[in-house]
Each structure stands twice: as structure tokens, then as C-alpha cells.
Amino acid sequence: MNDGWSSHSSHWGAFSARWDGRGVEIAPDPGDPAPSPILGNFTDTLRHRARIERPMVRRSWLEKTGEPRAFDGAFVELPWDEVLDLLAAELSRVHTSYGADAIYGGSYGWASAGRFHHAQSQIHRFLNVAFGGYVRSVNSYSAGASAVILPHVLGSFEALSRRNVTWDQISEHTDLVLAFGGMALKNSMVASGGISRHIERDAMRKAAQRGTRFYCVSPLRDDLPEQADATWLPIKVGTDVALMLGLAHSLVTEGLHDRGFLARYCTGYELFERYLLGIDDGQPKHAGWASEITGMPAADIVALARRLPQGRTLITVSHSLQRAQHGEQPVWMGAVLAAMLGQIGLPGGGYNYALGALGHTGRRVNAVPIPTMPQGRNGVDAFIPVARISDMLLNPGRPFDYNGRTLTYPDIKLVYWAGGNPFHHHQDINRLRRAFNVPQTIVVHETAWTPTARFSDIVLPATMTLERDDIGAAATDPRLIAMRKVAPPVGEARDDFEIFSALARRLGVEQAFTEGRDSRQWMEHLYETTRQALAARGWDAPDFAEFWRRGELALPSEPDDGGLLRAFRNDPEAHKLPTPSGKIEIFSETIAGFDYADCPGHPTWLPCTEPPTPRYALTLIANQPATRLHSQLDFGRHSQSSKIAGREVARLNPVDAEARGIADGDIIRLFNDRGACLAAAAISDRVAEGVVHLPTGAWYDPAAGDADAPLCVHGNPNVLTRDVGTSRLAQGCTGQVTIVACEKYTGPLPPILAYEPPTPVAQR
Ligand code: PGD
């Protein structure tokens, strides 16, 4: 590229970058109408002290002292060859002594956008090739509950979130968007694999200007952007199902529901209606009942219900609502409410689960496949729903429920992670710490000294995306990006592929792992699938060298045809839904047959079993941050610029702040029975009363001295969150909400040590 500029891509946008030996200059893709400010995190991170420069091994692990792992433990620097020999021998020992089902390779995490150096694909492929498999994880922290409930009642998560109503349809057709949990731009700014065009802000503006009315049902006003000109309906955290039921009740009692649609396209409505009207339990779910639970005036609920059938109405339910106990219910009830309005499958109407939750939704999908790294076959049966990791490590051999089955937690001896940060993403970090002390060995490949790296035994330095060539692509993005190397690797960092190839060599499976290809040959090989599909349809299909020279390639999209719901609406016999009945399941015989009290046979109001108490009177919302992706590059300039006194910022309502004597900028302590953290207070009337908002992603930074539940001095909300599954059905992540107390912190301010690398020590 010109003047040292290289095309590149990230989960938060395409850009060009130039390295001057110290810092990186970034220029967003000129075709992107709303580039993400998160790109600013790249500028100063390549040579930051938080980067891992050399392989390190925990001294107590090397010397087999049996000491528990600690965040401030001593590490010994070892040469690559020595550490790889050691690791290959340890993997062989565990495999020979205990089998492949003693190795946990779930390795959840977002890693980087490039499709060849995709850390998950690399680690899974390696473990499959070397050991015939590993204990895996299923589903995601994003959509743990919805991915399981949706196929039972409506269709696949993929179809309902990503191939459904588009922003174009909304701009053209939609009169009203009722967004449960909103559609915050900070979320749609990000798409796994890359996003070259951020279209959501302008799409919402265009729709609002044409007259679409947006309603933001959320305790946080900014869950819809100002461009949507939304009406904010503040609601008590976790009560959306009660509001949906109150709306549904008003529709029925006023005869506004679409009986024809319910009869033709749905099954089980009559049973659900009995519940709605309170025929069996004596409690009609009327607007007054919903008002008591949600805190919204009953008259407003009735008025909103009357508006819904008046034009083209779209109901959306965000990921956040299902990242909570009983998270299956809002996903299901949102679909039922939309079914009662009879607009499912119409352009711009009906139901789109998780629209705006990521930059993958509301778009047309590509007409050709994108490059993906083949992972091979996993021959191990054992798996866990991803957020059950602490349960698994702490309870080997214990049975647990999942989606109608009784499974058993395997006995894990070795945990291997690449491309994720469980000490960021998992709930109840103090419990996770106890769980991570159970396995004999923990291995991580990381770019930086994350808390996960600091708690591992063998820490291998991985290159950052800017330090290697790759191909950026997502099935919902119309550009394939040549991700060109911008700078040399820091220290002795190596690509994950290179590390696994070297291990595979030591284990005698190098040929099977690499198939005789180096990185460049792999990229050419993976690109070929896309090129051939383009060529087969007569589209521009340059060879790899030409694609690389150009820096990007346009990918044609499928038509905006409304996906499976439109086809079903047009001809429900020819295009049955992939549910047991082929229809929308308002009552599910399958789910009822599982006999789970926490997920019955139709959508049900199930309050959280840990409600606020006089001691823990506030509800914490721990959602996605606006200044970084998850915990990635938390040490970067943009992320750092939003902190106050180095701490993550927690927002709270003026009423709650005043009651506690807290002023803007004060340092506060948030705590409950599980843990405590510091944060900096920002007082805001954009946060509903009774709520504290602390986003995720500030690196866990435990103060020394309190071994059991140390204070996180930086502001990681996962020291507070509860580690329970959404229900026995999905066992999804419930990290979004928890109860807390909050007070002004007046002690001496502890230093932030989260980004300080351990000082290497000599082996004794
Ligand atoms: P990231 O910070 O993206 O978080 O959890 P996830 O673990 O995905 O971690 C990715 C790590 O990969 C980073 O540490 C980065 O340095 C590393 N990395 C990047 N590129 C490479 C590479 O090429 N090679 C290697 N080896 N490493 C690399 C995110 C998870 O958090 C998600 S998806 C959700 S939706 C959840 N959300 C919440 C929530 O809403 N509330 C709470 N309380 N908790 C959550 N946790 C979940």
C-alpha cells in the first residue's frame, strides 16, 4: 500500500494502519459511514508494557510445589524450544494418563478478526489432530439462552437474528419498533470477523425521519441512539416478560389480537391464553399486574398495547435480556407477542431476535461462503454449556441438566486457552479462581498479560492481529479484507498457528496439522473457496495475489427476502418452521415434557430468585462496554481515556447518588456477598432509579492481602455477578444483572496494577 499504509480489519471496523516503530497511525475505511472510535485502541498498544514478550512458566508449577495459583505468582522465562518440549510432554502425560476427555479446550473467546489466525479454530484443530478431541463448550456467552430456546419454538438462532428483518426494511416499512433492551450502537459497532460499513446509526435516523416511532424499553436511556428519537420506557431490571404479558393481556381483552394468524401459524395459543387470563392460577396478567412488577404506569401499558396493531410493528429483544436468570422467557414471550399481532414474516414487521445486538444483524447475508479454517473432528462426547465452566471444574462427575438431557461434568486435568479471557468474561470471579485452582495445568496463548494469563501456568506470547497477515471476513459483511501485517511481532511472540505447528511436530502429527502448508499457503487455500464460488456465478473472482494487491474484494449479497419467516408466512405448508409442529410453538410439548420448573411449557413470568434486599438494594447492569470490545485492549488509548482516576466508570441515578452522599467523580465501592470492586461514579438521569451501570471489560485487578475475595480496585463487575445458569433448559450465562450495595470509598486509593507484567524470577 502507499506510504507504508496497510489495509487491515478488526471486529470493530476495517481500516488502514501505518507503524513508525513506536506507535500506529490509523485511518478508518473511507467507505465506512460511521467508523468506530474503538479503532483508537490500536494506536499505542503494540509495544505497551502489558504485551507478553517471551514464554513464561509459573515457578510453582515447574517445581511442583503444590502451591495454589495466585495473580502475583512468580514466573520463570524459558526459551521457546524448552517450553514447547515441556508443554508437549505435559499434554502427552495428561492424554496418556487420563484421556482426551481430561483436556478442556472450550477456549471461549472473541480473539481477532482474521479467519486463518482465528485462535479458536487453531486450538480446536490442534487438539482434534493431536488427541482426537477435547472437552468442548457449546453455545456462547452472548446468546446462551436464546440459542437453545429458539429452535424449540420458532427456528434457529442464526435465522431469527441474522437473516430476518433488515435495516432497509425498517427504513421503508416499519411504523413502530418496540425494542426490549434497546439497540445500542456500541453493540452493533462490533461484528465477529469484521464490519466494513457501520450502517445502523444512519438507518435508524432515516427511519425516524420517515416517521418510524422507536420505543426503548430499558433501564438505560442510551440503549437506543439519539438518531432514533426514541420514547424511553424505563423499566425495572429483568421485568420485561411482565410488561409483554401486560401488553398481551390488553390485546386479548380489547380483541386486538390476530386470531387468524394464531390459528393458522401457531400451536398452543389456547393453553397460553388460559395462563394470560389467569384462568388456572387466578391471576390475570393485566396491565395493573404488570405495572406493579415493572414500575410502568398501567395506563401507559394499555395505551402502548392499543398502538401496536395500528401499523407495521416490529418487536425486538436484545441479547442482554436473556443474559439473566430465566433469560429464555423474554426471548419466547417477545415472539408470542409478535405472533399475537400477526405480523411475523411481513417486511419490516413481526419479530427479530437480537436486532442491533451485533453488526451482523439487519443486513443481507453474503451470497458466497467466506474463508474459514477447518477444525477437524472432535471424537470426545463430553461438553458443557459454555458458562458452566466453574461448575465443571469444581464438580467432576456431578450430573447436570441441559436441554432435556442429564449430562455429567468431566474430570478436567488440563485447561488450554487461546483467544479468550475467562477472568474477564465469566461470572463470580472469586469462584472462578477457586475453580481454576483445580486442574493440574493451565496453558494460555495471549497477546497481553490479561488476568487469565497471570493465573495460568504456561503462558505463550501470541502475536497481535497487526503483527501478521490474515483475511478478514464475516458472512454479513460485503467486503473481504486483506489484513496486511503492519509491524513486526513484539519480543518473541509467535502466531498461534506457528505455536501449534511446533507442538504438533513434537507430538508427531505436524503433517496432519499443517497439511504441508505454511501461513501464506493456508490463506491462499482458504481464499480459494470464496474465489471459486464467485467464479461459478460469473462474478469478479481475482486470484489471491490480485486480491492481496487490491486490499479488499466486494462480496455480493443474497436478496433481502425476509428469510425463513417470510417463506413460512407465504406458504406455511411448503415452508414449515423447523420446530416439532412446523409452526410457531406458543406452547411447546417438548419443553413441557422436560418438566423444568424454571422453564415451563409456555412463556411465563418467573421472577429472579435473588431480588434486591434492604442491604443490596441496587441492581447492577454489567453490559458491553462502549470503549473497547469486551476486555480487549483495555490498556489502549481510547479505553483509558474514559476512565476516571484509572477506574472504570459506574453510572447511577441522581436520586440513588444523593441518598448515599455520592458526587460525580467520587470513587465508590460496589459490593455484595460474592465480592467487591471500586469504580468511579458518574451521576446520570439516563440511568433508571435503583440501577447501577458498570460495563464489563476493565481488567480484574485484585488488591493484595485478602486471599478469598479480594477487592478489585479497577472495576470488573464480574466479581459481583452470580454464577448460575439461566435455567435447566439452556444453562446460559446470567452475567448481565446482579444485586449490589454501593457506598462512597474514602480509603487510600490503591494503585492500578492490572497492566503490570510479572517480573521474571530465576528457577530455584
Ligand atoms: P475478550 O476480551 O474479547 O473477551 O469474552 P471474551 O473472552 O471473548 O477476550 C479475547 C482475548 O483474546 C483477549 O484477551 C485478547 O488479547 C486475546 N486475543 C486476541 N487476538 C488473539 C490471537 O490472535 N491469539 C490469541 N492467542 N489471543 C488473542 C467475551 C464474553 O464476555 C462475551 S462474548 C459476552 S456476550 C459476555 N458478556 C458479558 C456481560 O454482558 N456481562 C457480564 N457480566 N459478563 C459478560 N461476559 C461475557
Image (cartoon, rainbow, N blue to C red):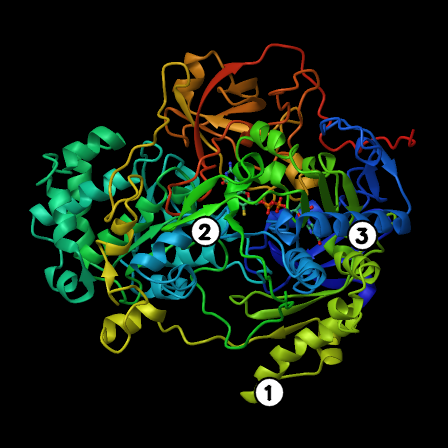
Q: Which amino acid type is marked by label 3?
A: Ala
- Label 1: which secondary element: helix
Image x and y of residue 640, in percent: 67, 35
Task: Name the residue carrying label 3.
Answer: 88
- Label 3: which secondary element: helix
Vertically, is 750 above or below 530?
A: above
**Splitting the image into 4 quarters, where does residue 276 fall?**
top left
Q: Which amino acid type is marked by label 1?
A: Ala
Image x and y of residue 177, in percent: 30, 53
* Tag 3 near tag 2, CB within 8 Å: no
Task: Name the residue carrying label 1.
Answer: 535
Q: Which amino acid type is marked by label 2?
A: Ala
- Where's the N terminus, which quadrant? bottom right
Q: Which of 429 and 510 lies nearest the eye of the viewer?
A: 510
Q: Residue at x 39, y 19 (%)?
A: 617
Numbered disc in front, either 3 or 2:
3
Q: Residue at x 44, y 53 (%)?
A: 356
Residue 396 in sight from this viewpoint: yes
Q: Residue at x 53, y 58 (%)?
A: 198
- Label 2: which secondary element: loop
Q: What is the distance, in whole Å, between disc 2 and disc 1 at their CAs?
A: 33 Å
Image x and y of residue 153, in percent: 29, 57
Q: How many neighbours does mark 2 have within 10 angstroms: few (below 14), some (14-19), or many (20 or more)?
A: many
Q: Which mark is residue 357?
A: 2
Q: Which mark is residue 458?
A: none
Q: How many neighbours does mark 1 have within 10 angstroms: few (below 14), some (14-19), or many (20 or more)?
A: few
Q: Which of 82 and 571 lies nearest the eye of the viewer?
A: 82
Q: Is residue 584 left or right of residue 180?
A: left
Q: Is residue 564 left or right of residue 344?
A: right
Q: Which of 459 and 542 lies nearest the eye of the viewer?
A: 459
